Image (cartoon, helix red, strand yellow):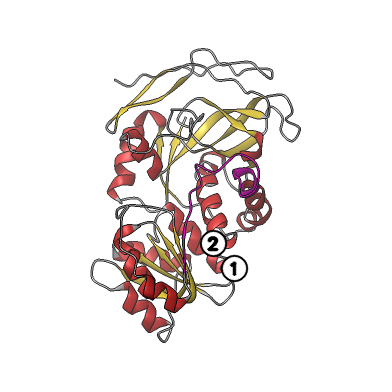
Amino acid sequence: MLCDTAPLEQPKSAGSSVANMYAIVAESANQLSWQQVPDVAPTRGEVLIKVGAAGVNRADLLQAAGLYPPPPGASELLGMEVSGVIAAVGDDVGDWSAGQEVCALLAGGGYAEYVAVPAGQVLPIPDGVDVPDAAGLPEVACTVWSNLEMTAHLSEGQLLLMHGGASGIGSHAIQIARVLGARVAVTAGSKDKLDFCRELGAEITINYHDEDFVERVREATDGAGADVIFDIMGASYLDRNIDALANDGRLVIIGMQGGIKGELNIAKLLSKRAHVIGTTLRGRPTTGPSSKSDIVAEVTRSVWPMIADGRVRPIIGERLPIQEAAEAHRLLSSGQVTGKVVLTV
C-alpha cells in the first residue's frame, strides 16, 4: 500500500540528517512502495538535496527487478538523477550553498525526499528550465555528451545512427548531434515516433519493424555507412551494426536491451578499421580521469549553454507523482513514452 506524508522540515546545517524520510522501496519489479527509510546526511564533499523530482531510467527498472545492483557504496534506493533545492552541504564543499536550485547525477538514491550526492556531480539548473523538467536532464546529458563528443568525437558532417531515437537518450542525442553539425539517422518502432525524431532534426528515419537499417544507412551514404552508431540494444544488433559502420567508424554500446552475448565477425571489424566501444556511466568513479565529476563539468560548460539558448530542450514525455513509481516503470517499459519520464516529489 502506498503512503502519503506531509512535507518534512528541511535540515538547516551541514551534517544534519533528515528524520522520518520517505522513499520508494522496491520489494520486487512490480512492488514499489512509498515508505519510511533511514535518514541521510551529507558527509565530507557531499551536498544534501531536497528532491523536487527524479528522472526514471531503464537502469531503475533493471534494479527493481534485481538485475542491476548499485555500485559498491551507493544507495540501495532507486533513482540516478534528481532536481531540487540544496538543503545542506558537508565539509569541504565550496561551490554550493543551501537554498540553490540544482540537479544532480547519482549512483542511486533519487527516488526519495532527500539524497546526498558528491558535490562534483551537482549541476545548476539551465536557464529556462523548471525544476521538475531538470530532473530529466543529468543522465541523458552526461550519457550523450560523454559518448558522442568525449568518446566517439562526433564531428560536423559525420553521420550518427541512433537506435531508439524517440527515447530519452535518443531525443537528446539527436539534438546534440545537430548542434555539432552532424547528420542523424534514427531507428524507432512507429510512425509517430519517427515523425517526432524528424521534428528534432533527424534526417533519416527507419522503422525497425519493416525496414533494414543497414540498407537504409548505406543508401543514404552512397554505401559509406555511419561514422558513429549509438546503440542501446547490444547483442541482437552487434553484427548488423558492424555492417552499417563506415570505415574508421565507432560503435558505442551503452545498453543491452537485445541481450548480452553476441558473435563478432573480426574480419569485418578489421576490414573497416572499426572501433567497438562499451561504456557505462553509473559505475564510473566519482573523481579522477573519465570520472562522473569530469563529465558533469564538461556538460555544464558545453551542453547547458545549448539548453539555455534553445538549441537543445528537455523532452519530458510524462510527469507522475513519485507514489506512482510503479506506473512510471510500466510506461517506460512499454515503450509508450517519447522522451523522459519524471517523478515529482
Main secondary structure of the magenta stretch: loop
Question: Residue 70 vs residue 191: left or right?
Answer: right
In front of the other: 137 or 108:
108
Which mark, residue 247?
Answer: none
Q: Position of residue 33 (x, y in %)?
A: 34, 24
Which mark, residue 180?
Answer: 1
| Res. 155 image quadrant | bottom right
**Which residues lie in the magenta part?**
275-295
Circle 2: element type: helix
Residue at the image point whose x is 53% and y is 37% from the top? 106
User: Is residue 321 one of those drawn in magenta?
Assistant: no
**Can residue 127 be seen in this snapshot?**
no
In front of the other: 263 or 131:
263
Q: Residue furthest right?
A: 94
- Between the C-alphas of marks 1 and 2, the distance is 10 Å
Choose the circle earlier in sequence order: 1 or 2.
Answer: 2
Residue at the image point whose x is 35% and y is 52% from the top? 256
Mark 2: which amino acid?
A: Leu
Residue at the image point whose x is 50% and y is 42% from the top? 283
Residue at the image point whose x is 47% and y is 72% from the top? 274
Which residue is tagged 2? Answer: 148
Circle 1: element type: loop
